Image: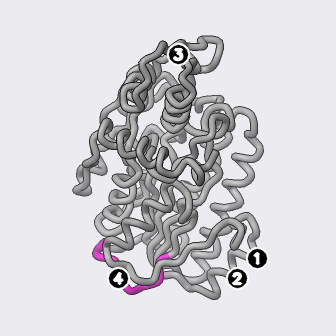
């Protein structure tokens, strides 16, 4: 951290964002982006802008620059990304690397050119080494080997962090990065092939209840430990950091507590009302053994998570059931 801070050229004191200024949420229809949009609306922001991927392909550099020239946002949250679980990351590493690099570079370069004052780049806890000391501190970045099943996605996100640091050094802009733990909540991807672990479990167990089957099979051994943060908490943390934190080092965003995959599966089964048997396919990969974030820096900035895991799961399951016809399958 000392070397990073020594090279930083930003002289900025965070404060309240102007509620009437133009605020672009890149990826506003995704899990995180939609939650940030809801949070900003509830906080009184009146000039929010977003574009669907059909309206604006962030991989198209010319289109992105034209969009920034037209809208001239003062604030940006870069939540747009190609995301997925172990299977998707392991099967399509080129897509996860290439697409995310292009999205990030295009948005960040356009934001520099068109005078964005405050930008928050969102990464992922997979940026940290597979066997990083637990809980993982921000300075663990680039200290060891990545988890092989999602290394391509992780490299793209690491590049984003370094680009934000480079913008701070070269242009003196007070831009920041936040690294969330595993997120869940309304608007998630519940596809069995493309989702992360928690929405996949919700889908699997809820399908079992609906179809009346007596057993569910999950990947791996169930022993890896994971930390889960409700996406509405993540949205609150993003706005808090934009108004209260400045620095070149990324900030971990999580709860500071974790559970085993087996424990979370049991909780999901209970919440959806599944009373059958859970089996584990140990021929499938577990992924990283443990991934718990050290959230000390976040606490120093004055923020902590508020949504209890079981309560968050219950509301997410209800949202999934209420939106079966429209959820991402």
How far is mark 2 from mark 3, CA to CA?
A: 54 Å
Asked whether 229 or 209 is in front, the reply is 209
- N-terminal-most mark, 4 or 1: 4
- How far across and down, in percent of the image, does residue 287 sit? 57, 25
| Residue in the image at 60% along x and 37% along y | 85
How far is mark 4 from mark 2, CA to CA?
A: 24 Å
Near mark 4 (Cα within 10 A), the count class, few <14, some 14-19 or many ≥20, is few
Q: Establish if 251 lies above or below 169.
A: above
- How far across and down, in percent of the image, does residue 65 sit? 69, 78
Which secondary structure dominates the residues rendered in magenta? loop
How far is mark 3 from mark 1, CA to CA?
A: 53 Å
How far is mark 4 from mark 1, CA to CA?
A: 29 Å
Tell me whether circle 4 and circle 1 mark residues in contact (CB < 8 Å). no
Q: Secondary structure at mark 2?
A: helix
Residue for badge 1: 62
Q: Quadrant of residue 212?
A: top right
Residue for badge 2: 66
How far is mark 2 from mark 1, CA to CA?
A: 6 Å
Tell me whether circle 2 and circle 1 mark residues in contact (CB < 8 Å). yes
- N-terminal-most mark, 3 or 1: 1
- How far across and down, in percent of the image, does residue 159 sit? 61, 52
Residue for badge 4: 18
Specify whether 142 is left or right of 183.
Answer: right
Residue for badge 3: 214
- How far across and down, in percent of the image, does residue 138 sit? 41, 43
Question: Magenta stretch?
Answer: 14-23
Near mark 2 (Cα within 10 A), the count class, few <14, some 14-19 or many ≥20, is few
Which callout, 3 or 4, points to the residue nearer the camera? 3
Q: Which mark is residue 172?
A: none
Which callout, 3 or 1, points to the residue nearer the camera? 3
């Amino acid at each position: 951290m000392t070397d990073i801070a020594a090279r930083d050229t930003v002289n900025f004191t965070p404060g309240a964002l102007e509620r009437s200024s133009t605020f672009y949420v890149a990826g506003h229809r995704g899990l995180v982006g939609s939650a940030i949009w809801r949070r900003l609306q509830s906080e009184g922001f009146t000039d929010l802008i977003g574009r669907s991927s059909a309206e604006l392909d962030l991989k198209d550099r010319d289109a992105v620059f034209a969009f920034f020239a037209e809208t001239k946002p003062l604030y940006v949250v870069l939540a747009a990304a190609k995301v997925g679980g172990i299977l998707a990351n392991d099967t399509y590493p080129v897509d996860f690397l290439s697409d995310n690099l292009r999205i990030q570079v295009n948005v960040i370069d356009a934001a520099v050119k068109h005078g964005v004052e405050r930008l928050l780049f969102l990464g992922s806890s997979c940026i940290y080494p597979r066997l990083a000391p637990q809980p993982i501190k921000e300075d663990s970045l680039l200290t060891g080997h990545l988890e092989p099943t999602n290394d391509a996605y992780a490299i793209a996100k690491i590049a984003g962090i370094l680009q934000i640091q480079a913008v701070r050094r070269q242009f003196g802009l007070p831009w920041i990065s936040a690294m969330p733990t595993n997120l869940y909540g309304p608007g998630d991807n519940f596809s069995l092939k493309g989702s992360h672990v928690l929405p996949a479990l919700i889908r699997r167990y809820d399908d079992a209840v609906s179809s009346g089957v007596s057993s569910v099979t999950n990947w791996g051994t169930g022993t890896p430990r994971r930390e889960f943060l409700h996406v509405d908490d993540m949205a609150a943390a993003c706005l808090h950091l934009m108004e209260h934190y400045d620095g070149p080092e990324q900030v971990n965003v999580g709860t500071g507590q974790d559970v085993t995959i087996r424990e979370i599966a049991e909780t999901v089964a209970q919440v959806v009302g599944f009373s059958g048997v859970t089996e584990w396919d140990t021929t499938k990969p577990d992924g990283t053994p443990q991934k718990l974030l050290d959230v000390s820096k976040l606490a120093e900035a004055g923020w902590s998570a508020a949504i209890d895991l079981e309560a968050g799961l219950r509301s997410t399951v209800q949202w999934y059931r209420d939106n079966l016809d429209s959820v991402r399958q």
